[in-house]
Amino acid sequence: MNSYEMTNMIIDEEAYGEEHVTVELLFEQQNYIITFQKSDLELMNAWVLEDGKTLPANLSKGLMDSIKEDIKKKI
């Protein structure tokens, strides 16, 4: 069982035909927004929402790998 809950996933087509996948998730009672390139799931950015602010997030490699596997299953 995952230690996080994926609450939303959006696939965006950006400039030059590149697609990105943005996921919103709840992990350890904090909300995160993480964006990957759709083609290879390379991390583009990760943010944590704290006290009305958006701050850079630092998530473990294991957690990121788990999130990527969930994304692969859904797209």
Image: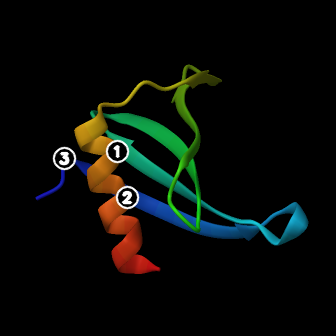
Quarter where residue 22 is shown: bottom right
| Front position in the image: 73 or 24 | 73
- The residues bearing labels 3 and 1 have C-alpha atoms spaced at a distance of 12 Å
Q: Position of residue 27 (x, y in %)?
A: 31, 40
Say whether marks 2 and 1 touch (CB < 8 Å).
Answer: yes
N-terminal label among 3 and 1: 3
Number of numbered labels in the structure image: 3
Q: Which mark is residue 10?
A: none
Q: Give the residue at mark 3.
A: 3
Which tag is nearer the camera, tag 2 or tag 3? 2
- Residue 65, percent from left and from top: 30, 50
Q: Is residue 20 above or below residue 52?
A: below
Q: Are marks 3 and 1 in contact (CB under 8 Å)?
A: no
Q: Where does label 1 land, which residue?
A: 64
Q: Which residue is mark 2?
A: 68
Q: Is residue 7 above or below residue 35?
A: below
Q: Amino acid at mark 3?
A: Ser
Q: CA distance from mark 2 to mark 1?
A: 6 Å
Q: Quadrant of residue 44?
A: top right
Q: Amino acid at mark 2?
A: Lys
| Residue pictured at 53% horizontal, 51% vertical | 42
Residue furthest right as drawn: 15
The kind of residue tagged 1 is: Met
Q: CA distance from mark 2 to mark 3?
A: 14 Å
